[in-house]
Image: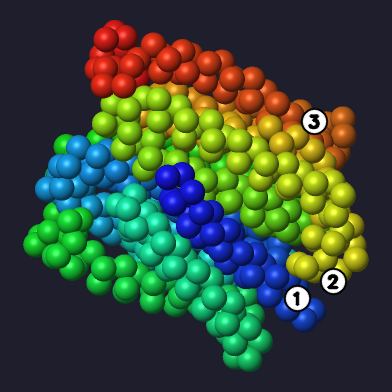
Amino acid sequence: MLRKYAVPGIIAMTASSLYNMVDSIYIGHIPDVGSLSIAGLAVCFPLMNLSTALGTLVGVGAATMISVLLGRKDYDKANTVLANEVTLNIIIGALFAVVALVFLEPILTFFGASPNILPYACSYMRVILYGNVITHLYFGLNSIIRSSGNPKLAMGLTIFTVTSNAILDPVFIYVLGMGIEGAAWATVLCQSMALAYTLWYFLDKKRFLHLPKHVLSLDLKIAGESLEIGMGPFLMNAAACIVAIFINQQLQKYGGDLAIGAYGIINRLSFLFIMINMGINQGMQPIAGYNFGAKKYSRVKDVYFLSAKWATLVVTLGFVVSEFLPGLAVSAFTSDPELEAVASRGLRLMNVAFPIIGFQMIATNLFQCLGMVSKSIILSLSRQLLFLVPCVYMLPIWLGVDGVWLSFPASDVLATGLTVIFLVGLVRKLNILKDGDDPAILGSKI
């Protein structure tokens, strides 16, 4: 069962990561300005992460609720949740885009853009914000397609966006001479085409999960429940935004524009393996949610441990690439020898503890799937805010720019210890429950 949901999710998330990597590769090789362009793209990461955080606040919560409701055969409420997801994404996506566009230059400057980088960052981010509502809707509805039992379609749509983006990127960037702005337009156009099909899919009344007659409706109670469940991944992504700001500022202070460009490359490479694990997470989510709703606790444990095993193997592969093949990996993004040298060293230092983060990601998602919001939030924030931020500011005092890179493995080790404590407590509770038991017998929400 995990393979049925996880393999399409892995392929989709890998394709999504490649989607971002393709942009970076093309942008990094723009004649004469490739290094500045890729640094400008890196400065945009925090703002893009914040937009993603708001999208996951709605999308992940809705997808989790729908998977549980489908397990209970409550199709009417599942359709209502779907309508809420569309309405909330439109509202939140539009508000975010307007505010960000008005204050774009000061925001990007605060995020670490120097005068040399700022024009490239603004050119890219402005176009991305024009299509912000489209992005929110597409990714939110895509996750619901997966949760409703059609992971292959969700995968197919993601592959379509990746393939079309890889084709359109060189056309917009080089043939039309639009540079980094062309990459953004290609991204928005590809997502628009995928969203058009997704909306057509959910407007089919013959499907058990479809948009109701009043598509743009908002049930405040359901919206509140959805936002509560999505709060964990939202805070995790929002924390990633805040941390990325601090990292860019420290990199600018200790390494300049070159270090920021290097981080842009390292982030894309590392994200490939993180996204594969997110695909495993997406495969686990509907299974864990459905079986928890059906009170089949043994299956919840089984799917967690299987997911954690595969996630650990993935990040271990990422560790091998980072430590033994850094130059080869980095060379795909730049032909600048100085930037390549900085990025290669940063990649080796930043991912030295990569093998331990796989099960941590899966555990955090498991708590969210089971509705244990507070624990999910704590685990989501621990690595990035509680541990990483202090390390980012303390270690460079003694180690310079190397301290920024080493702050990542230091926080990974600390966060893993906290995850083990929480996970042991959860497994003990699940071991007490027998399939069919009401979790309320434990005297607390599980």
Identify the residue at image location x=59%, y=55%: 45
Measured as percent of width and height from the top left, residue 25 is found at: 70, 70
Mark 3, secondary structure of its residue: helix
Report crowding for label 2: few under 14, some 14 to 19, many 20 or more residues within 10 A (C-alpha): some
Residue position marked by numbered label 1 in the rendering: 29
Identify the residue at image location x=90%, y=62%: 338
Q: Left or right: 164 with respect to 405?
A: left
Q: Left or right: 138 with respect to 423?
A: left
Q: Are the residues flagged by discs 1 and 2 in contact, CB closer than 8 Å?
A: yes
Mark 2, secondary structure of its residue: loop
Residue position marked by numbered label 3 in the rendering: 395
Question: Which residue is at the front of the view, 383 or 315?
Answer: 315
Which image quarter: residue 289?
top left
Residue position marked by numbered label 2 in the rendering: 335
Report crowding for label 1: few under 14, some 14 to 19, many 20 or more residues within 10 A (C-alpha): some
Identify the residue at image location x=47%, y=73%: 160
Which image quarter: residue 122?
bottom right
Measured as percent of width and height from the top left, residue 425 is found at: 48, 14
Q: Left or right: 251 with respect to 44?
A: right
Which amino acid type corresponds to the residue marked 3 in the rendered image? Answer: Leu
Identify the residue at image location x=56%, y=42%: 240
Q: Are the residues flagged by discs 1 and 3 in contact, CB closer than 8 Å?
A: no
Q: Left or right: 50 with respect to 77?
A: right
What is the CA distance from the residue labelled 2 to the residue labelled 3? 30 Å
Against 169, residue 110 (above or below) is above
